[in-house]
Image: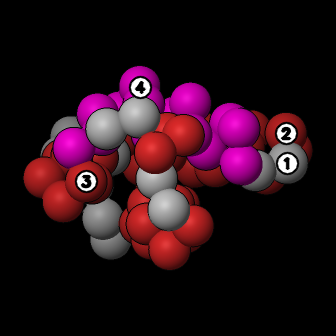
Amino acid sequence: MKHSMLDPATLGEIIEMALSDHDSFDAIRNLHGLGPDAVKTLMRQNLKSSSYRAWRRRVRAFSDRREVYK
């Protein structure tokens, strides 16, 4: 699924899922067909750069602690 083809509601849902500590990249892939790299690109394009960096730090920290996280 191309990012430009996403309607605003779907885009908002994907961003909300990615920001949530309870949804994994696999859940986003199953629901919307976007893999981790596509989600990261989408987040980089739609968040402020400082918000994106904070999100990536949090995702990396969780993945270091829990193998089945994002």
Closer to the eye: label 3 or 2: 3
- Residue at 25% of width from left, 54% of height from top? 32
Q: Amino acid at mark 3?
A: His
Name the dominant secondary structure of the magenta segment: helix
Q: What colour-coding does the image apply?
A: secondary structure
Circle 1 sits on which residue? 48
Alpha carbon distance from label 2 to label 4: 17 Å
The magenta stretch spans residue 36: yes
Q: Is 51 placed left or right of 38 in the picture?
A: right
Residue 32 - label: 3
Q: Quadrant of the N terminus?
A: top left
Which circle, 3 or 4, is nearer the viewer? 3
Q: Is residue 1 above or below residue 8?
A: above
Please give the label number shown on residue 49: 2
C-alpha distance separating marks 3 and 2: 24 Å
User: From this viewpoint, is residue 69 visible?
Assistant: no
| Badge number at residue 69 | none
Magenta residues?
33-46
Which residue is found at the position 61% from the left and 44% from the top? 43
* Residue 16: % across, % down: 50, 70
Q: Is residue 68 part of the magenta span, yes or no?
A: no
Q: Are marks 3 and 1 in contact (CB under 8 Å)?
A: no
- Of the two numbered discs 3 and 4 on the same chain, state the one appearing first in sequence: 3
Circle nearer the N terminus (1, 4): 4
| Nearer-N-terminus badge (3/2) | 3
Q: Secondary structure at mark 2?
A: helix
Q: Residue at x 32, y 71 (%)?
A: 22
Per the image, the residue denoted by label 4 is: 37
